[in-house]
Amino acid sequence: MEITVNTKLYAVIGEPIAQSLSPQLHNGLFKAHHLDALYLPIGVKSENLEKLVDGFRIMNFGGFNITKPHKMDIMKYLDGIDPLAEKIGAVNTVVCRDGKMIGYNTDGFGFIKSIENKLGNIHKKDLSILILGCGGAVKSVAMALADWGVKKVIITNRTLEKAANLSDQINETWPGKAEAIPMEESQLKKVIQEVSVIVNGTSLGMPDHPERSPLSKTLLRGDILVYDMIYSPPMTQLLKDAQACGAQIENGLEMLLYQGLLAFELWTGIFPDPILGKNLLVKD
């Protein structure tokens, strides 16, 4: 595209950033809606995060997304934070308007939209979900699920203390909605018999270790939804094992899609057609 003095700039920041599909999505959406805007992938190390944000202010950016590992640290450099993002303690979308930078979290919305039509006859008030991991995206998803009204969010992590801290944070606002358990096979086996959805929020299965899975195949059931927040590769070892067991599977692509569509709406006032967005993400 031709860049003019009026071109509004947006970005996704993280480290690493090369794998992000967000530029593909947002630049396609800007073009489809005839908006003079450009979305850039920008890699930044933690020690340079504040300088980058200052640069965005000087360059009058319209907004930006944040991915690993900056979703929590970014908050200290913003002028305001949406109440749900404040509770979550992580921001993945910033809107720059009227000289102010306001942080939001669209990850939870993205996750919920991506599973709604896959739950069949299960009502959210009867839904128990096991989440593996305690990173920024997990916090977003776990708190959004509690706010949405699920029956129980069960969190497990290699460091039990982190899972317990997240569970306590959730229960402060949504009493009784969360529980933490050790990441031990005996505990997991018992819990997996009671849940309808298993979510991988760890990095196990990403391209650096594609053969690794956070769960033994023997723990999986055929009558559940197994969801991996990872979308590259599209079929992690966990999803391969779950599919072999007959389970319904889903990767993180639709979560990426819907969180991106909400971010786009926060920036432009337009919520794009999800079919258009998905076509942009899966194009060659």
Image: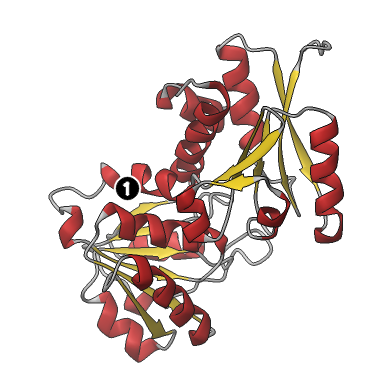
Q: Residue 136: where, in percent of width, then height?
A: 56, 61
Task: Report if residue 284 is visible in the image.
Answer: no
Residue nearest the viewer, comparing 69 with 232: 69
Q: Secondary structure at mark 1?
A: helix
In the image, residue 53 sits, relative to residue 223, either above or below, namely above
Q: Residue 167: where, in percent of width, then height?
A: 40, 75
User: Does 28 sit left or right of 140 as displayed?
Assistant: right
Q: Residues within 10 Å of mark 1 (few under 14, many from 20)?
A: some
Residue nearest the viewer, comparing 284 with 94: 94
User: Does 249 sit left or right of 118 as displayed?
Assistant: right
In the image, residue 137 sits, relative to residue 95, either above or below, namely below
Q: Residue 123: where, in percent of width, then height?
A: 15, 53
Q: Residue 75: where, in percent of width, then height?
A: 66, 54
User: Does 12 sit left or right of 199 as displayed?
Assistant: right
Q: Which residue corresponds to mark 1?
A: 115
Disc 1 residue type (three-letter) = Ile
- How many marks overall? 1
Location of residue 59 (image quadrant): top right
In the image, residue 256 sits, relative to residue 7, either above or below, namely below
Rendered residue at 28%/69% (across/down): 177
